[in-house]
Amino acid sequence: MKINLKKLPVSQLLTASAIALALASPSAIAAQAKHVTVAPENMKEQNLASPNSKGLFSHSTMLAVNSADASQKSLNATTNIQQVDHTIYFDGKENTPLIFMGPNSEQWQMTVVDPSGKELLNEAKNPQSRLNVEPISMGQQSFKGKQFVMPKAAAGKFKVSLSRKQANNQQISTSSKAEGFLMFKGDPAYKLYSYLDNNLTVQNSNVNIVAYIVDAQKDRGNRQKMTQKKPLQSSMSRAFATITSPSKKQVTLQLRDDGLNGDKLAGDGLFSAKVPTSEVGVYTSQVQVEGIRPDGIRFSRTATDLYPIEQADYRLTKSAASMKLTTDTKALVSVPVEILGKSEPIYMAAEVWGTNKRGQLQSAAWIGGVVSPNKGSNLELSFDTRWLTRSKLNAPYSLKSLRLQTVNNNVPIAEMDNMTLKAPALLVTASKSNVVSQTNVDPLKITNDMLVGNAPISSGITLQATANPKLLLVHGYCSGNVWSASNFTNAAVFQDYNQNRSHEAFAQQVINFGAPYTSYGIVAHSQGGAAALHMYSRYWTGLDYATGGRIIQSVGTPYRGTSLAGSLAVIGDIFGIGCGTNTDLTYSGAANWLATIPSWARAEVDYYTTSFTDKWWRYDYCHLGSDLLLDDPEDGTTEKWAGQLSGGVNKGHKTGWCHTTGMRDAAQYYDSSRNSSMNSRAAR
C-alpha cells in the first residue's frame, strides 16, 4: 500500500507556522520516528524468525595459517625455513581454487601434494610455477593473496605446506593472530549448518552454538528446505568452535553430541557448546568440522559468522499494559518496563488482540516503532482504535509477541508472549456495541493514517511552498561511487564512501543528505537498498512525499544477508584493513531486521538481482574468492535467494552481471538498460 500523504485529512496537517519552521530547517523533522501498523492478515512477516532458521550454511573450509604452529629447519648458516603444514580433506567434484590470503603472502611459497602422493605444485622448488600475488576479491573488498586452481582434483587427503625464508636469529612468532588463511571449496551438496540457539543474545545469557551436516543434493539454493533437513547421523568425527571476543580474547570450544555442557540431546546429530556472552560487542565465531559422508568420502568444513551481544537496558515487567485515548480514534499503548541501564531509544513491537463475538481472542493489528521511556518508565506506541472496529473486537484486550530490539542493530533484548492490556472506560463502553470509532468512514477500509499515524508535514502544502524533488543515488556497504549521475535526471549522488554502517546508521546518513529536498525517490545499490527501506519504515523523510513512480529501487541488495559478512571481518582483521564487523549483513542479523519492516513498506521496493554467466564448458563464478562461500546463482556478494524481499516487487533476475567491478562479468550498476528504466520510473 502506497502512503499518499496528499490524501491525508486536513485535521492531520501541521499548522502553517509548523510548516514554515520545517521548511526553514528540514533536518528538524527528517528523523522523526514513525509508529507503524500492519494489518492482521499481513503480520506473519513481523514475527521473529526461529533461531534454528537463521544460521549459516557452508561448503568450504578456511584454515588459519599461524606462525606459532610452524616448524623450522636450517637452510644455511644464516637462513632458516619456516613451514606450516596443513592436511586438508577435499571432497569436491569440480575444479576448485586453493587460495592463500595474507598481508605477507608474497613471502610464502605453497606446496600441494594430492592423495596419490603426486606433487601438484611446489613454488619453492620450481620458480617457474610461482603463483602471482594479486588482489583476491570478496564481495566489495579485496585482499592480497595467491590462488591455485586444482584441475578436476580427486577427493581425498591433500597435504598443503606454506614455507618462507627467515633469518636464523629471528624468533618464530607465538602470536595467536593468523598470518593468513588457506581456503578451498568442498562439494556444495554436503553443507555444514551452524546457528545460535537463542534469539536473545544479551550479556551473560545462555547461548549455545549448534552445528551439523546436511545432505543438500536435491535442495541447493532452497534455504527453507535445507533448514528443515535432519542432520546426517554420525557424520562428524571432529567439531570445535573458535570464538573471538570484542576485546580479541580467543577461546576454542569442543562441540559435542553427548547431551552435556550446552548440548540438548545426545546422539541427535546436533553438536553444540555454550558460547561466551560476558562482553558487550560483536564476537566472531568459526566452527570447524571434519567427518565422513555416507559414501565414505572424508570432508572438512568451516563456517565463520558474527554474533552481537547487547546489554539488556530494559526488562518487561509482569504488570499490565494500558491504552489511553488521545482522540476519538487515536490511542497510546503504554507498556511498563524496568530500566536496567541506559534509557536510550529502543524498538518496541507487539500484536494487539481483542475478543470477538464468539468470545475468542483475535488479532487486531501489529504495531511497532522506536520509543523512549516516559517519566513513568513506560514505553508508548501509537495505535489507531479503528483496527478494533475493523475486526469487531471487544474487551478484554491483550498484547502478544511483545518484544524489544536495539535500534542500531536490531538485537532482541526482551520478549514476552502475553501481557494484559487495560482499556479506558470510554473504549470499553463503546466496544460493547462494536462502535469504537465515531467517524463516518468504512470500518473495513484501511487508510494511510491507520498504518503510519499523523504525518509531520503535508506534501501538498510543502510542494506549493518550495518545490525541490530529487532522485537520490545511493551506494552500498564499504563502497565508492557506483552510479553515474549522467544516466539519471534530476539526481543527487549520496557520498559516504568506504564506510561500515549498520542499516540504522546508514539510513541516518541518507536522511541527513536528503534533508534539503522536499521529496525524493531512491535508486540504491547493495546495502543502500536496505538502508532506504529502513528509513522508509522507521522515519518520516522525503520518501513519504515522493510522487510519480517507484519510491525505492534497488540492485544487488542482500535483504536476507550474506555469508561473506563473517569471513570478511576475520580476513580484514589480519590485514588491518577492510570495513570491520556488520551484523546487519549476516543471515541472523538480516532476519532480526526484517521482522521490523512492515509489509506495506516492502511493497514500495522494486528490486533486481543478477548473477554471472554460466557456460557449460568452464568453471564459472563472479570471483573465485567469494565463490567458495556463496551458493549459485550469486553475483559475487549476494546470492539470488538472499536478494529476495518477501512482499517486495521482484523485477527479475539477469545473468551476465556481477556485484561490482573487478569480477568476471560487468558490474551490475553499469547496466544502461536497467538504469534507463529505473530513471524513467522513479518517484521524485
Image: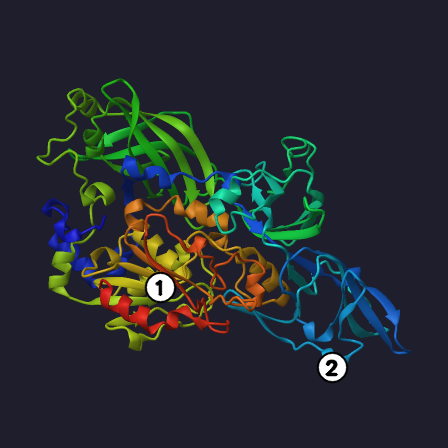
Disc 1 or disc 2, which is closer to the eye? 2
Answer left or right for 196 relative to 165: left
Label 1: which secondary element = strand
Query: What is the three-letter code of the residue carrying label 1?
Result: Ala
Q: Is residue 314 visible?
A: no
Few, some or many residues within 10 Å of mark 2 (<14, 14–19, 20+):
few
x, y percentage for residue 551? 26, 58
Give residue 460's position: percent from left, percent from top.
Answer: 12, 57
Residue at x 62% of width, y 62% of height? 94
How far apart are the two marked residues, 1 and 2, measured between alpha carbons?
Answer: 46 Å
Q: Amino acid at mark 2?
A: Gln
**Image quadrant where residue 173 sits:** bottom right
Identified at 23% across, 48% down, the residue is 1
Mark 1 or mark 2: whose residue is earlier in sequence: 2
Disc 2 element: helix
Residue placed most toward the observer, 24 or 241: 241
Q: Is 652 on the left-hand or right-hand side of 233? A: left
Tell me residue 377's x, y (percent).
Answer: 37, 35
Q: In the displayed structure, would residue 276 be above or below residue 681?
A: above
In the rendered view, does 677 fall on the left or right side of 168? left
In the image, residue 173 sits, relative to residue 442, either above or below, namely below
- Vertical comparison of 157 with 490: above or below: above
Residue at coordinates 40% horizontally, 38% vertically from top-left? 47
Q: Which mark is residue 128?
A: 2
Return the residue at label 1: 524
